Image: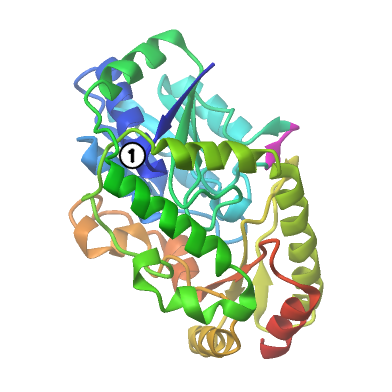
Amino acid sequence: GQVSLFSTGRAGMTVLLRAMRRLGGPARREVVMPAYTCYSVAASAIKAGLQPRLIDISPESLDFAPHELESVDFSRVLAIVGTNLYGLPNDMAGLRARADRAGVFLIDDAAQSMGARVKGRWSGTWGDAGLLSFDKGKNVSAIDGGAVLVASKDLNDSLRDEMATLERPSLMSAATQIGKALAYAALLPPSLYWLPARTPQLGLGRTVFTTDFPLAHPEPALSALAVAQMRHLEEFTEARRRNARALLEGLAVLPGVSTVTPLPDTEPVYLRLPVLVDDPGIRNAALTALEAAGIGATGSYPLALNDVPELAAVDPDTPAPGARRVARSILTLPTHPYMTPRDIALALQVL
């Protein structure tokens, strides 16, 4: 396979979808994606000139609801995107088989699952293409950056053609990004959480739908930082799994709370630990209390994609009850290596 680097993960996704569009024919303009996922997936499809096709999810796994996916008419579909939320892999073997039956591309979006495995195989390697992200909060972070992994020569040639028009980073943008990377690294410990949370330039804690993002080559210094951090991937992954296990053990005794069950034959990386709180009011109170305690919990994506105002006309017939349930009840807890046993105990005490 071939690897291509981009300024951001969403830039990589957009250019990849444009490359697939070149090969897919004029009738195939839909991109199948979960109705609950990162807004950037839908934004990338629209920026690529394609239409998101929203499919409901199972709250128990955050993967596609199987019966919903089986009922899709694939005649206008270009690609399926498995998004592997919070480092919990989707049923990528099942998605691979479904894409093959339908004759469509499969994108294994490992932006949130770098280091996870499905049936012993790395997340990001199950598709015709895979996506990695080095954005803020990822398992390997260089503040920004993304990579696209492509399996076939035809798709790689099409991707290279699309990349020929990309912007080059300026010296000013490079200096800005490096400064942000240094600030972000310095402020990661939970004891300092209040500082980055109140630093708008870092863009933490905001969920905004936008297609207004540059399509550019990566900043070389940030790419070098990502490569250097990749050497510590297993170390980062094990720390996240250890912290997730400790949180799961404490959460098991709390009423009104359920956790997401990893699918069989998957090894999650737990980029964050997703928790579903039955009562949305209690969920919101818990988020407020955790923030006051300096624990970087989030309500993650506040809406199912079919409820995002900018997407109102995209797929209006999708009811997506599973996605809507997750949006109103999810709470995600940090698992990163800076979380100490004391931080975990505090988070559980607050909950």
Quarter the C terminus occupies: bottom right
Q: Nearer the viewer, residue 265 or 7?
A: 7
Residue range highlighted in magenta: 116-120
Q: Is residue 60 left or right of residue 182?
A: right
Q: Nearer the viewer, residue 98 or 335?
A: 335
Question: Residue 335: x percent and y percent?
Answer: 67, 64
Q: Is residue 70 left or right of residue 250?
A: left
**Is the magenta region chiefly helix, strand or loop?**
loop
User: Residue flagged by tag 1: what amino acid is it?
Assistant: Ala
Asked whether the viewer can see residue 50, the reply is: yes
Question: Residue 241: x percent and y percent?
Answer: 76, 56
Q: Is residue 32 above or below residue 64?
A: above
Asked whether the viewer can see residue 203, the reply is: no
Question: What residue lies at 56% left-to-right and 75% top-to-bottom?
Answer: 297
Would you name the residue on which mark 1 appears? 11
Q: Residue 106: within the magenta?
A: no
Question: Residue 171: x percent and y percent?
Answer: 29, 42
Question: What residue lies at 39% left-to-right and 15% top-to-bottom?
Answer: 155
Q: Is residue 337 left or right of residue 166?
A: right
Question: What residue lies at 78% left-to-right and 52% top-to-bottom?
Answer: 238
Answer with the quarter of the image where residue 303 lies: bottom left
Q: Is residue 231 above or below residue 332?
A: above
Question: What residue lies at 47% left-to-right and 73% top-to-bottom?
Answer: 196
Q: Is residue 253 left or right of residue 226?
A: right
**Secondary structure found at label 1:** helix
Q: Residue 119: within the magenta?
A: yes
Q: Residues within 10 Å of mark 1 (few under 14, many from 20)?
A: many
Q: Nearer the viewer, residue 85 or 313?
A: 85
